[in-house]
Image (cartoon, rainbow, N blue to C red):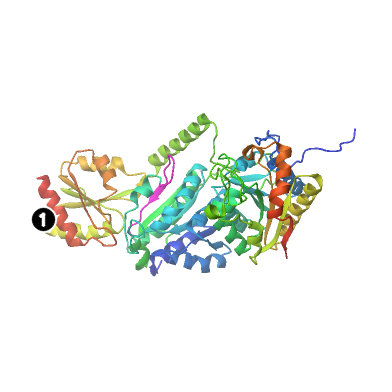
């Protein structure tokens, strides 16, 4: 199929329609506003629902209502708006409701900046709201991958009855690049016989709830959610290793920094430094075993984590995976500043030198 | 033997957890009877709040969702927009609706969302133990205004029906109470009219039910009924606030 030039946010929105999204509930915030803008026009044209909510809080609760009544529901926002959605995401996960949440990250904390950031890794991978839970977190590094992952995002959500977050940075949302619309294999999905669709002759009522007054019942519910997490961790891990076979320095990065790191690999290798890239595509579940194995490889002398975050957030998971086998160092910029190829090259050389 | 009265098919057999004298049980019954009489039980999707009626999903014999505190109108929007031909309702208390959920109810009314909200106004937070609500009357004691609510500290109580009636999308708002049979019958008619207007696709419909909370008011059920009539009704006048 011929390639088409698309803006990231609009491509994601179009991909959601193609993935069978029934309804979208959103609220404006830079740098993701093109998602609701695109869907406000195109969802009704496909006979689908678009509502501009009064707040991010309302939008995620509209998602709750629609998802609980059996619909493929989606919302999108950017960092401060995603913070507002956390209550709803906790309820959605507790009530086992599938949905897709796109987070087009900007720099923080607070109002931060409207420029790209990756400072919400903890929030995206540790639950984010109250309680013990996880949401699957998919982190595309370019528009093609973002588009390809949308069908999977909805399917994964439906498979596990769990929210899925598509976590990208503002750069992926705002840039334009050529993509092609590929046919993504659809999964076989369980029937939504739990949904509150109206009884329609059913001999019992369906209800959606996350409140348990009896401690043992709430404990059992938590155990059930934990079992589901174990299953997702077993089945859904995705990652990519580039030029790692002989790598002496492994750069770990996701999203935009991973793309920049790819160029840094070429520069480093041209200078005789054997550099590789390890890129988690699922941030949760994190590709822990894969990175552990790679770090244990004889050729690897050091690991350098690169993020658009002040002190690094994914680096915690990197260290837990590497488990002290090799030294792990960090290079990052925050507040909307994007690391350059030269900075990554220098940081890689420094990390290698310190390891030696 | 002729059956002269029986429990509505709109209610399950679950035992209610409400305190003696609380009006929730009566209002549940009225909503259930209206849904049954209109033949809507098989189609209806309800949303219960955070508050004393958080477990309403156990009592209504229709599909139900339990929403986060105050968010029921947003949840109902998500349901109704994707199920436009089915009856959808929220059942919310005054802490839930008038305080933390003020934005959600106002904007649902503004958009003219075609669902029905049953609003239980008992002038206090029930489940959390009797704190001041936006609807607590001036001088009324609560655990967070132990000497009585003052205007200086908390402003005047909010009249939600009047507020929502200013929205063009709100086609029906009526305030009722269930302290006696005559008022109970009026309340049922109001609830029925709200659902009828919803099913006719007219817009957002709202029924405010003044209710007692004997436990947190510190009164017997009978005294609470009288207190409602003497104190709440003068500030929250009964009747149709808006009908389009």
The magenta stretch is: A128-141
Query: Considering the image in quadrants, where does the C terminus of chain A appear?
Result: top left
Rendered location of residue B191, percent (x, y): 74, 52
**Majority secondary structure of magenta residues:** loop
What residue sits 51% from the left and 43% below the top? A96
In the rendered image, the vertical position of residue B127 relative to residue A312, given as above or below: above
Please name whichever residue, B199 or A74, is drawn nearer the observer in this view of the structure.
Answer: B199
Please name whichever residue, A166 or B9, is drawn nearer the observer in this view of the structure.
Answer: B9
Residue B203: quarter of image:
bottom right
In the rendered image, the vertical position of residue A220 relative to residue A74, given as above or below: above
Report whether A127 appears left or right of A347: right
Report whether A88 appears left or right of B208: left
Rendered location of residue A251, percent (x, y): 22, 51
Q: What chain does badge 1 belong to?
A: A
Residue A149 visible in image: yes
Report whether A300 appears left or right of A210: left
Query: Considering the image in quadrants, where does the N terminus of chain A appear?
Result: bottom left
Rendered location of residue A74, percent (x, y): 49, 56
Q: Residue furthest right?
A: B1
To which residue does mark 1 refer? A272
State yes or no: residue A132 in magenta.
yes
Residue B41 visible in image: no
Number of numbered discs overlaid on the protein picture: 1
Classify mark 1: helix, strand or loop: loop
State yes or no: residue B99 in magenta.
no
């Amino acid at each position: 199929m011929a390639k088409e030039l698309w803006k990231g946010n609009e491509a994601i929105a179009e991909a959601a329609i193609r993935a069978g999204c029934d309804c979208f509930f959103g609220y404006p915030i830079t740098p993701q506003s093109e998602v609701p803008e695109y869907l406000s026009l195109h969802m009704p044209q496909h006979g689908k629902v678009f509502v501009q909510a009064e707040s991010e809080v309302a939008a995620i609760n509209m998602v709750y209502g629609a998802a609980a009544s059996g619909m493929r529901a989606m919302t999108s926002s950017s960092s401060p708006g995603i913070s507002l959605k956390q209550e709803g995401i906790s309820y959605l996960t507790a009530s086992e409701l599938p949905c897709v949440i796109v987070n087009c990250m900007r720099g923080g904390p607070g109002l931060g900046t409207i420029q790209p950031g990756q400072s919400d890794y903890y929030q995206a991978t540790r639950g984010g709201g109250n309680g013990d839970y996880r949401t699957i977190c998919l982190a595309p590094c370019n528009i093609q991958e973002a588009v390809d992952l949308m069908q999977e995002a909805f399917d994964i959500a439906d498979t596990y009855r769990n929210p899925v977050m598509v976590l990208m940075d503002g750069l992926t949302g705002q840039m334009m690049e050529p993509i092609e619309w590929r046919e993504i294999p659809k999964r076989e999905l369980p029937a939504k016989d739990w949904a509150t669709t109206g009884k329609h002759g059913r001999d019992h009522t369906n209800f959606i709830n996350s409140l348990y007054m009896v401690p043992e019942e709430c404990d059992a519910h938590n155990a059930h959610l934990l079992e589901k997490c174990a299953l997702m961790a077993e089945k859904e891990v995705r990652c990519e290793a580039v030029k790692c076979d002989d790598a002496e320095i492994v750069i770990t990065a996701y999203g935009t920094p991973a793309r920049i790191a790819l160029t840094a690999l070429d520069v480093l290798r041209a200078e005789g430094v054997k550099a590789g890239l390890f890129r988690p595509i699922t941030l949760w579940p994190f590709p822990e075993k894969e990175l552990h194995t790679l770090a244990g490889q004889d050729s690897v002398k050091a690991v350098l984590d690169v993020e658009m975050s002040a002190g690094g957030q994914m680096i915690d998971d990197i260290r837990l995976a590497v488990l002290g086998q090799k030294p792990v160092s960090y290079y990052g910029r925050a507040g909307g500043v994007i690391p350059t190829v030269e900075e990554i090259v220098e940081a890689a050389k420094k990390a290698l030198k310190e390891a030696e | 033997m002729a059956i002269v009265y029986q429990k509505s098919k709109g209610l399950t057999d679950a035992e209610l957890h409400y305190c003696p004298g609380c009006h929730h049980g009566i209002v549940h019954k009225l909503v259930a009877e209206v849904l049954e009489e209109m033949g809507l039980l098989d189609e209806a999707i309800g949303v219960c709040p955070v508050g004393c009626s958080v477990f309403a999903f156990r009592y209504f014999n229709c599909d139900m969702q339990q929403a986060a505190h105050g968010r029921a109108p947003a949840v109902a929007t998500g349901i109704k927009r994707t199920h436009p031909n089915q009856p959808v309702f929220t059942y919310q208390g005054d802490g839930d609706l008038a305080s933390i959920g003020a934005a959600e109810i106002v904007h649902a009314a503004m958009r003219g969302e075609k669902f029905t909200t049953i609003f239980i106004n008992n002038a206090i937070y029930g489940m959390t133990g009797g704190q001041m609500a936006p609807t607590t009357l001036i001088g009324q004691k609560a655990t967070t205004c132990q000497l009585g609510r003052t205007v200086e500290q908390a402003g005047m109580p909010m009249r939600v029906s009047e507020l929502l009636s200013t929205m063009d999308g709100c086609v029906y708002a009526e305030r009722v109470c269930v302290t006696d049979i005559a008022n109970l019958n009026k309340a049922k008619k109001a609830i029925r009219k709200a659902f009828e207007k919803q099913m006719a696709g007219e817009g957002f419909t709202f029924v405010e039910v003044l209710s007692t909370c004997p436990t947190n008011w510190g009164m017997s059920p009978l005294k609470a009924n009288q207190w409602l009539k003497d104190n709440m009704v003068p500030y929250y006048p009964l009747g149709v606030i808006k009908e389009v």
